[in-house]
Amino acid sequence: MPAVVDHEARRRAVADVTADLIARAGMEAVTVREVAQAAGYSTAIVSHYFASKVELLFYTYRATVLRAHQRMEAALDTGGGSIRPYLAALLPLNEEQRRDWLVWFSFWTMAIADQTLSAEQQVRSRQITTRITALLLERGLSEDAARAGARRLLVTIYGMASQAFFDPDRWPPETQLSLLDADLAALGVS
Amino acid sequence: MPAVVDHEARRRAVADVTADLIARAGMEAVTVREVAQAAGYSTAIVSHYFASKVELLFYTYRATVLRAHQRMEAALDTGGGSIRPYLAALLPLNEEQRRDWLVWFSFWTMAIADQTLSAEQQVRSRQITTRITALLLERGLSEDAARAGARRLLVTIYGMASQAFFDPDRWPPETQLSLLDADLAALGVS
C-alpha cells in the first residue's frame, strides 16, 4: 500500500520553511532550491506544489496571516473575553510573532512591484481593522469610538512592530505591552 | 578648459534616481544599468561613483534620511517654533514624503541580511528619537515625559506610515494629521 501523503501539510511545511528563510536571510535568499533543501524535499516536489516562486511566496504570506489570526482568536477564547491577549498575540513579543512581522514587512516591499500582492495586503489589513472594530463594539463602544479605537490600536501595533523590526533591544515585551495597555485604558476596555 | 564636474551633485542625482526606482518598481528593479539609464549617465560613470550595488544603496539610504532631516529642520525654523510642522514633514503626506517611506521600508527588509545596513538604521532611528526628545524638553516637558512623548509620537508616525504604505486611500493627509494632533494635544504641546 502506498504511503498516504498529506499534500496540504506538505504545502504548509514548505511555506513554514520559506517564512523562516525570509526572516533569517531576507527575501532575496528565497529560491526553490534553497527552500527544498531546508524543507528536506527535492526541488521536484516543491515545484510540484508551487508552480512558481511567486506562487510559493503568495501562499507563504497567506499562511502566516492565517496562522496569526488563529493565534489571536485562540488567545481571545482563552483570555476570558479580554481583548488584550488577542492584540498581544499580534505583537512581536516572541520569536514566532517577530518572525511574522519580518515576513510581512518583506512582503510589503515586494508588493511595490506586485499588484496582486498589494491588493491582498490591503484586504488583510482591512479585515483585521473590521475585526477589532467589532470587538470594541461588543464591549460597548459607539460605532465612531470603535472605529477610531481600532485605528488607534493598529497604529500603535504597526508602529511598535516597525521600530522593533530593526531595534528589538529598545522594544522588549514589557515596553510593547505598556503602550498597548495605555491605548486600552484610554478606550476604557481591557 | 574642461568642464568642471560637481561629483557630489552627480552622486546625489544618481541616489535620487535610485530612490525613485525603488519606490516605483521595488528593490529588485535596482541594477547599475537601470539606474544609469534613468539618470542619463553611462554605466561606467555610475560605477565610477559607486563601487558596488551595495555602496549605491547605502548612499541612497543615507541621502534620503539626510534630506528628510533637512526638510524637518527647515519646517521647524519656518514654523514659528511649533513642533507640528517638523513632525508633519516626516509623515507620508505627499509624493516626496511617501517616496521616502517606500525607500526606507525597502531598506529595512534588505537589512535582514545586512548587518551594516541594520546598524545604520538603528543609529538613524535613535537619532530622531533623541532629537524629538530634545524638542519636547525645550517645550517644558520633564525628562521622563519627553522621552515617553518622543516614543509615542514615533510609534504613531511609523504606525501610520506602515499602514499608508499599502493602503494610502485610508490614510489621506487629514487623517494622518488628526492622529498626530491628538498625540500633541495629549502631550500639551503644539
Image (tube, coloured by chain):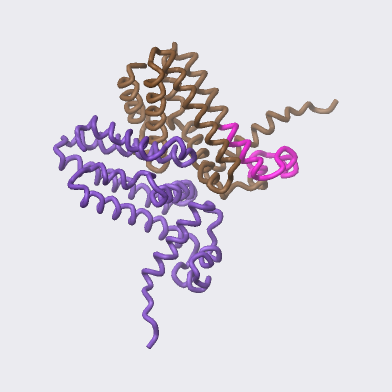
Chain colours: A brown, B purple
Whole-percent x and y of residue B45? 48, 73
Front residue of B156 and A21: B156
| Residue A17, placed above or below residue A146 | below
Whole-percent x and y of residue A24? 52, 43
Check the picture and name the quadrant holding the N terminus of chain B. bottom left
Q: Which residue is drawn at the image coordinates 45% and 17% (left, top)? A: A135
Which stretch appears magenta? A35-64
| Residue A3, placed above or below residue A112 | above
Q: Which residue is drawn at the image coordinates 51% and 52% (left, top)? A: B24
Residue A58 on the magenta span: yes
Front residue of A104 and A164: A104
Drawn side of residue B73 relative to residue B7, left or right: left
Check the picture and name the quadrant holding the C terminus of chain B. top left
The rendered magenta stretch, by its main secondary structure, is classed as: helix
Q: Which residue is drawn at the image coordinates 49% and 22% (left, top)? A: A131
Q: Which residue is drawn at the image coordinates 22% and 32% (left, top)? A: B187
Whole-percent x and y of residue B160? 39, 37
Front residue of B116 and B153: B153
